[in-house]
Amino acid sequence: MKTMMLVLLFLAGAAQAQSRYGYAYYGSPQMRWSLPANNLHMQDTGRPTNITEQRFGQIIDEVMAVWTPVAAAKGIKLTVEKRWSDPTVNASASQSGKTWMVNMYGGLARRPEVTDDGFALVVCHELGHHFGGYSFYGRTDWASAEGESDFFATNVCAKYIWGKQQNRNGLYRRLRETPPVVQKACETVWNGNANAQAWCVRTALGGHSLATLLHTIGGRDAAPAPSFDTPDKSVVTKTSVSHPKAQCRLDTYFSGALCTAKWDLNVIPAKKFSGGQDTPQAEQEAMKYSCFTAGGSSVGVRPLCWFKPLNSGFRRF
């Protein structure tokens, strides 16, 4: 009898521990996730592939070091949970009053598709839900849409965390495996700025790491592998706030790296905008800080595979 009780207590404890894993909260309306809900945690062995536990913490700290003071200047406490032992293959963000939270899970870092830079961009994506601004999940929702958070990750966040790493960035100028379309676009857009050209390549390749993982989640046989040479040609009739498909997200990461607009750290574009966050006027406000064709940009704009502009003049990058 005593043995049976011990077994039951052990099983109850194990079930309780498992319920605290990130994937148990899929579907929670309070949380925004970097990736679609998935069961890849079942494949997690607990053994690192590209990213060790130490590097897991370092990457998170490097990104948060930039954005914690930005949040503090707004009266916000920005917190992060480093859940290395959690097998969840995802990342999440949530808000509770003036406390803004990011959760990073070891299951994501241990995926073979995920590189150091790809993982850093996921941290950036979650911060994008908090700081990315227009376009939002809804008229009054706190969170930026999934595509917008992807765009923020490469257009804004990566520039701030990697922009001054000239030696590291320089390594990406000499990578033979860099797709020619990436090399050419980065050299053209950031003409005369060798560091920005290299950073652009680095950012695009980090995005490809994540697109490869997204392709795995979506089912490798369901669609061709994402490639810089095959942009998504679909056109939405309304901005999609949910997770775009792998190719569309790769296009978004790449496009963000090609946007040369100057961001303002003091602003979350169009947040709590008078008249609603989903209006043409809110979009016009966001044009001050990002690339829109209606605002005069010809490259580095949000792809039509998830974004529907509310102002005229938008065309495919």
Image (cartoon, grey):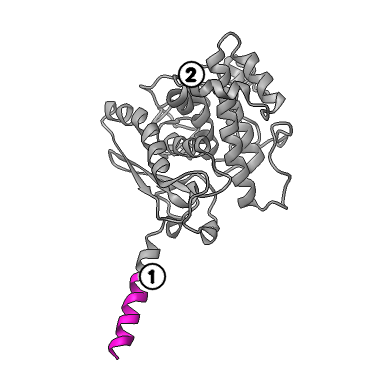
Q: Does the magenta segment cover residue 109?
A: no
Determine whether, in the image, residue 236 is placed left or right of residue 8: right
Tell me the quarter of the image containing the C terminus: top right
Residue 45 in the image: above or below residue 156: below
The residue indicated by pointer 1 is 15
Which one is in front in this view, the residue at disc 2 or the one at disc 1?
2
Q: Which residue is located at x 58 percent, y 45 percent?
A: 113
Give me the C-alpha separation between circle 2 and circle 1.
48 Å
215 vs 301, nearest the viewer:
215
| 124 versus 73 height, above or below | below
Look at the image and tell me whether residue 313 can be seen.
no
The label number, if any, that marks residue 166 in the structure image: 2
Q: Position of residue 216 (x, y in %)?
A: 63, 50
Q: Is residue 90 left or right of residue 5?
A: right
Q: Magenta span covers which residues?
A: 1-13
**Observer-nearest of 308 and 160:** 160
Residue at 52 percent across and 17 percent down: it is 261
Secondary element type, mark 1: helix
What's the mark number on residue 116?
none
Q: Residues within 10 Å of mark 2 (few under 14, many from 20)?
A: some
Going by the numbered disc 2, the residue's amino acid type is: Gln
For image coordinates 60% across by 21% down, the residue present is 173
Q: Residue furthest bottom?
A: 1
Mark 2 secondary-structure assignment: helix
Q: Quadrant of the N terminus?
A: bottom left
Q: What x and y, as percent, mark residue 38? A: 55, 56
What's the amino acid at mark 1?
Answer: Ala
261 and 192: which is toward the camera: 192
Residue 177 or residue 146, whichever sits in front: 177
| x, y percent for residue 156 | 47, 25
Q: Residues within 10 Å of mark 1 (few under 14, many from 20)?
A: few
Q: Residue at the spot x=48%, y=50% of the render? A: 48
